[in-house]
Amino acid sequence: MENQLNQKSKIISSFELLNDQGRIALMPFLMAGDPDLETSRKVLLKLQDAGADIIELGIPYSDPLADGPVIQAAASRALASGTTISRVLDMLSDLRCELEIPIVLFTYSNPLLNVGMDCFCDRAAEAGVSGLVVPDLPLEEAEKLSPLASDRGIDLVLLVAPTTPKERMKTISRKSKGFTYLVSVTGVTGERTNMESRVELLVHQLKSSSLSPVAVGFGISGPEQIKQVREWGADGAIVGSALVKRIANAQKGLEVQAAGNFCAELRRAADEK
């Protein structure tokens, strides 16, 4: 445990390497178990091959308050296919030797607390998980979870919204581990045609006060938004609904190819000078 505390996290190491290369982190979001866990397994590896730097993996939940209709539908399909926390972690355990990039789990406080913070962190660490995002976890509860996760080599990533008061934003960003997750819009996840201009100011505010990199999510739908976020100085761009939609709309058997093609397109945009 002491060795884990003294080691630099896998997420921070990834951001530092990308920063040295002058690149932004491409961070696709995938709903585990949509349409089934075997497909998710293949998509994870395809995203890695297509240039993803960090993957955010959603654990399906029946009441996902922060998610828009696209990801809610994906969660429903995943639950219908029999996806559970335990099965997701078993899948990741099986992939430990193949997945080299950091995996950040996205879950809600209810399933986390049902399993138990200690037990969840133990299982996640055994599965090779590098980070954890719990969007509905109050800061006060996050302060209990963060050291439990850190003891096991897992970064608890905290979220900042456009409506977060400036002082609280500073507090959250300084307590966030791995990176600070900047929610670019007020409301739930989903594709947007244009990024709000105030996001640029929020990125600069966070960069001036945060001890960790800043990644922007919620509303990034394609290459143009990736370029915009990069120009604003963010360290990472999280793409969720747009990728989940492509997987859902793909012809049966072609989901993995659709995910890989879209990720490769985003990678080119992220690296374009």
Image: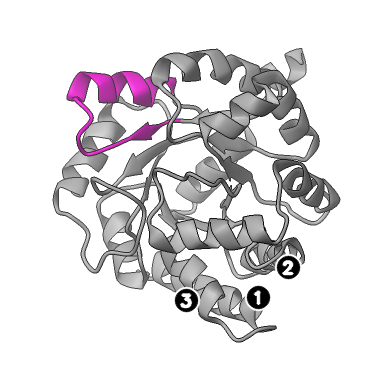
Tell me, yes or no, if residue 72 can be seen here.
yes
Q: Which residue is mark 1?
A: 256
Instruction: Work out which quarter of the rendered image holds the N terminus and state it.
Output: top right
Real-space CA distance between mark 2 and mark 3, rounded to the nearest whole angstrom: 18 Å
The image position of residue 77, as x and y in percent, is: 60, 63
Q: Residue at x 80, y 34 (%)?
A: 126
In front here: 226 or 141? 141
* Front disc: 2 or 3: 2
Q: Which residue is mark 2?
A: 42
Q: Residue furthest bottom?
A: 251
Q: Secondary structure at mark 1?
A: helix
Q: Quadrant of residue 259?
A: bottom right
Q: Secondary structure at mark 3?
A: helix
Q: Do the residues bearing badges 1 and 2 touch, measured as CB atoms within 8 Å?
A: yes
In front here: 73 or 245? 73
Q: Earlier in the sequence, mark 2 or mark 3?
A: 2
Q: Amino acid at mark 1?
A: Val
Q: Amino acid at mark 3?
A: Glu
The image position of residue 26, as x and y in percent, is: 48, 58
Q: Which residue is mark 3?
A: 265
Left or right of 129? Residue 223 is left
Q: Which residues are magenta?
A: 158-175
